[in-house]
């Protein structure tokens, strides 16, 4: 049977063979500059796809109130607030975000059967959305404290046909449930909203304290949430909550210990955690991260041998060859490679 062309006409089988021949000629011409050198064609084709993705982006559909829908590299659609300058421009103009981290998360989740995914500090829902596509029976639980962004998440879920296997929670994830907390939201960097305050001078990012919004938001611990929603175990969890990561981990201790397949990607903020955090994380057999040069670096032995949180942070920063005050660490009950 033939294929339908862009002009509506069906391509016959007699036409397909010459088309394949022409594609081979194009491919040969494209790769010819590499001569007889051994070429990683997969990498080159990925590069082509990357540029094709950039070419199609910049397109958007207005939702009203200044909000828009835009496409990302997976072909999925995401709702964003273009007034945000931290994440929205990357999604609108490139269709990508945190490419290496996303690819590593995809590699982990793609091996899981019908995973339960928690996106904690979801922002526009990038990780929950992109990881949802590997199984039509996966479930995604989004946690976003900012009510305005939680409203955007509902649009993303609807347009990608995910309502039956996702749940949006306008809650602050913490170590206790039922607290009423104050969420501070920078005007230009909505994804940096925090219930813990800020440990840097945001005026350097053109943010004036008077321009912040604030919301009262109710807290939940993940242990309480999982019990209430009959979630026996989590398979993958992304945690990025601007300094409140220890509260998330402490409030999820029972679930973490019971989840035999669990992998976590955690934004690590130097100097903000206690030994309680380390004690819980030691239940993971594997730890890894990208170093300063972008190489995947095994930190499992460092996690196992660390006597306290300060020692773990010191040796981790040294091995990753970074002086940054934050980076992303992966923890796994199973191998992360």
Image (cartoon, grey):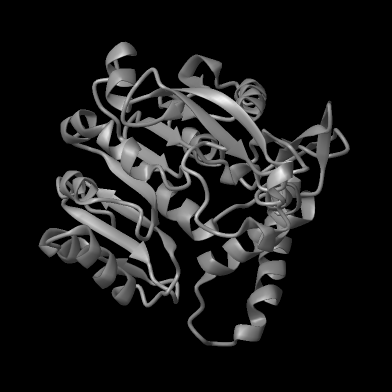
Left or right, 68 with reference to 295 = right
Residue 76 location (% of width, % of height): 64, 36
Q: Is residue 69 above or below residue 326?
A: above
Q: Is residue 116 above or below residue 130?
A: above
Residue 151 location (% of width, % of height): 65, 23
What residue sits 37% from the left and 49% below the top? 266
Q: Which of the 4 quarters of the picture holds residue 7?
A: top right
Left or right, 196 with reference to 279 = right
What residue sits 68% from the left and 47% below the top? 209
Residue 6 location (% of width, % of height): 83, 39
Left or right, 252 with reference to 42 = left
Q: Is residue 194 above or below residue 278?
A: above
Q: In the orientation shown, which residue stands out farthest toward the front?
A: 210
Q: Which of the 4 quarters of the picture holds residue 224?
A: top left
Q: Which image quarter holds the N terminus? A: top right
What residue sits 72% from the left and 37% below the top? 3
Q: Nearer the viewer, residue 106 or 249?
A: 249
Can residue 138 be seen?
yes
Q: Which image quarter holds the C terminus? A: bottom left
Q: Nearer the viewer, residue 102 or 135?
A: 102
What residue sits 28% from the left and 54% below the top? 336
Q: In the orientation shown, which residue stands out farthest toward the bottom?
A: 36
Can residue 144 be seen?
no
């Amino acid at each position: 049977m033939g294929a339908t062309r862009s002009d509506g006409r069906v391509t016959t089988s007699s036409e397909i063979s010459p088309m394949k021949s022409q594609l081979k000629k194009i491919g040969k011409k494209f790769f010819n500059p590499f001569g007889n050198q051994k070429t990683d064609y997969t990498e080159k084709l990925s590069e082509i796809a990357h540029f094709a993705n950039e070419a199609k982006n910049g397109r958007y559909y207005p939702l009203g109130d200044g909000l828009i829908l835009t496409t990302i590299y997976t072909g999925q659609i995401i709702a964003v607030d273009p007034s945000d300058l931290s994440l929205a421009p990357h999604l609108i103009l490139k269709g990508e975000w945190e490419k290496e981290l996303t690819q590593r998360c995809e590699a982990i989740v793609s091996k899981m059967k019908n995973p339960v995914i928690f996106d904690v500090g979801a922002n526009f829902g990038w990780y929950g959305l992109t990881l949802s596509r590997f199984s039509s029976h996966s479930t995604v639980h989004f946690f976003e404290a900012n009510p305005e962004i939680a409203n955007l998440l509902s649009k993303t879920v609807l347009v990608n046909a995910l309502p039956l296997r996702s749940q949006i929670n306008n809650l602050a994830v913490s170590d206790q449930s039922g607290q009423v907390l104050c969420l501070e939201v920078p005007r230009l960097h909505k994804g940096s909203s925090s219930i813990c305050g800020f440990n840097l001078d945001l005026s350097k990012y053109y943010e004036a304290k008077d321009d912040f919004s604030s919301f009262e938001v109710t807290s939940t611990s993940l242990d309480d949430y999982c019990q209430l929603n009959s979630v026996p175990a989590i398979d993958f969890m992304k945690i990025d909550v601007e300094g409140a990561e220890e509260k998330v981990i402490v409030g999820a201790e029972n679930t973490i210990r019971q989840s035999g397949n669990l992998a976590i990607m955690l934004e690590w903020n130097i100097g903000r955690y206690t030994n309680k955090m380390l004690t819980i994380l030691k239940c993971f057999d594997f730890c890894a991260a990208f170093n300063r040069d972008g190489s995947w670096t095994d930190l499992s032995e460092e996690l196992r041998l660390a006597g306290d949180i300060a020692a773990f942070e010191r040796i981790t920063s040294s091995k990753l060859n970074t002086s940054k005050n934050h980076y992303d660490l992966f923890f796994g009950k199973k191998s992360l490679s």
